Image (spheres, rainbow, N blue to C red):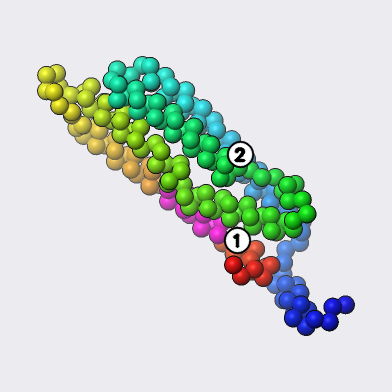
Amino acid sequence: MNSDPVKQAWQTSVENAGAPPLDEVRAGADKFYRFVKWRNGLEYVACAIVVAAFGYYVFSMPHVFQKTGSAMIVAAALYAVWQLHRRASAEPPERAGTIPISVFQRRQLARHRDALRGIFWWYMLPFVPGLLLIMAGSAIVNAPEGSGGIRLGWPGLLFVAIFAVVFFVIWRFNQRIADKLQRHIDEIDALTGRTE
């Protein structure tokens, strides 16, 4: 029996806090792993579709801006999926090794929270230059014959508005998930007595 009163008080407070059984923590870690693996799999499939579609556009679009913009979209998709793998890949709980499962799970949650909080910079922003170039090329192609100008018109403005709304919704959705992950991190911290 340990005679250190501080350590005994801490152990008692953890027991009184109602720390979940190890099986429950492990089940939560397994569930999170399966979700991340599934989500990333969907992202990889979406990347393949984007690469195939815009790769085709590189050769089929009439204007050089459209071709270049399409190539930039392909590059952005590959960059985004590489960043997703680097920042938020699925780590199975078996990799915890000798680390307590609660510590391992906290690290995974924090890693994914940070990836989601920065999603605008590494996932969304890389697509903007390509989209703008495609729009510019389309405006040139759709300009009236002999006008020598660029005609964006209401379809182009609608395109910009739709993408702005879609980008905002994606960003906001991911921020809400990051906030939810932070709440789970706070719960783990409260159960383990972590104060960081």
Residue reaching furthest to the right: 1
Q: Nearer the viewer, residue 139 or 3?
A: 3
Q: Nearer the viewer, residue 32 or 140?
A: 140
- Residue drawn 78% across and 79% down? 8
- Tell me where the magenta segment starts and ends, as one range: 171-182
Decide whether the magenta segment is chiefly helix, strand or loop: helix
Residue reaching furthest to the left: 147
For label 2, the residue is 38
**Depicted 103 relative to depicted 31: above or below:** below
Task: Name the amino acid type tagged 2.
Answer: Trp
For label 1, the residue is 185
- Answer yes or no: is residue 173 visible: no
Q: Secondary structure at mark 1?
A: helix
Magenta stretch: includes residue 8: no
**Depicted 139 relative to depicted 100: above or below:** above
Quadrant that contains the C terminus: bottom right
Mark closest to the chain's N terminus, 1 or 2: 2
Where does residue 92 sit, x and y in percent of width and height? 70, 45
